[in-house]
Image (tube, grey):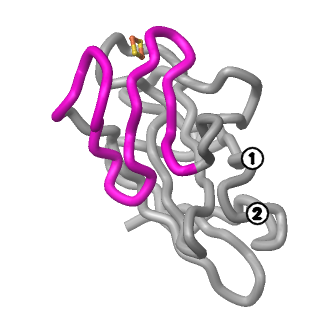
Amino acid sequence: MSAPVKLCPSAELLDSGRAHVFDMIEFGRPVRGFVLRYEGQLAAYVNRCAHVPTEMDWQPGEFFDDSRHYIVCSMHGAVYHPTDGLCVGGPCAGARLMPLRVEERDGQVYWYPSDRFRPAFAD
Ligand code: FES
């Protein structure tokens, strides 16, 4: 397994607030991931809607809907539950966002790259 990548200070991720977006490489191509906090826990996914493979944030790092309880895709309004990435409304209900492994320790947020999603600076 690749070494963890430091993403941001824990304090940057407010509950139901703006996400930290970061660059990755998937099969040689650039793709972005994001990590946010919901009900105190971190959740991280590939920034790719399950409906059409496009980025979802309506402003950079802004994924939450007006209720601040769901991740919403800015393209056609798919609604995802933050804790498990399940689409609970919209054109791809029942599909899921692709999760990424993250961890919080000593006041920092780390991402654990995989064989599929690698650090952008390593390629
Ligand atoms: S691309 Fe996300 S809802 Fe259509």
Q: Are marks 2 and 1 in contact (CB under 8 Å)?
A: yes
Residue visible at 32% across and 55% down in the picture: 84
Report x, y in % for residue 34.
59, 44
Crowding at label 2, few (<14), some or many (≥20) Cα neighbours within 10 Å?
some
Q: Is residue 39 above or below residue 46?
A: below
**Image mark for residue 87:** none
- Looking at the picture, which amino acid does disc 1 mark? Arg
> Where does ligand 1 appear, by image quarter?
top left
Quarter of image, res 27: top left
Q: Position of residue 80 (x, y in %)?
A: 38, 39
Quick one: 31 or 72, which is closer to the camera?
Answer: 72
Q: From the image, which quarter does the N terminus lie in? A: bottom left
* Image coords of residue 63 (percent x, y): 61, 36
Mark 2 to mark 1: distance in Å? 7 Å
Residue 101 vertical placement versus 39 (above, below):
above
Q: What is the quadrant of residue 117 in the picture?
A: top left
Q: Which residues are magenta?
A: 69-94
Residue 21 belongs to the span the image colors magenta: no
Quadrant location of the C terminus?
Answer: top right
The answer to whether residue 18 is left or right of residue 69 is: right
Q: Residue at x 45, y 45 (%)?
A: 45
State the residue lying farthest toward the bottom.
106
Q: Which mark is residue 18?
A: 1
Residue 118, percent across and down? 48, 45
Relative placement, left or right, of 120 versus 83 is right
Q: Amino acid at mark 2?
A: Leu
**Residue 50, quarter of the rendered image:** top left
Residue under label 2: 14
Question: Observer-nearest residue: 90 or 60?
Answer: 90
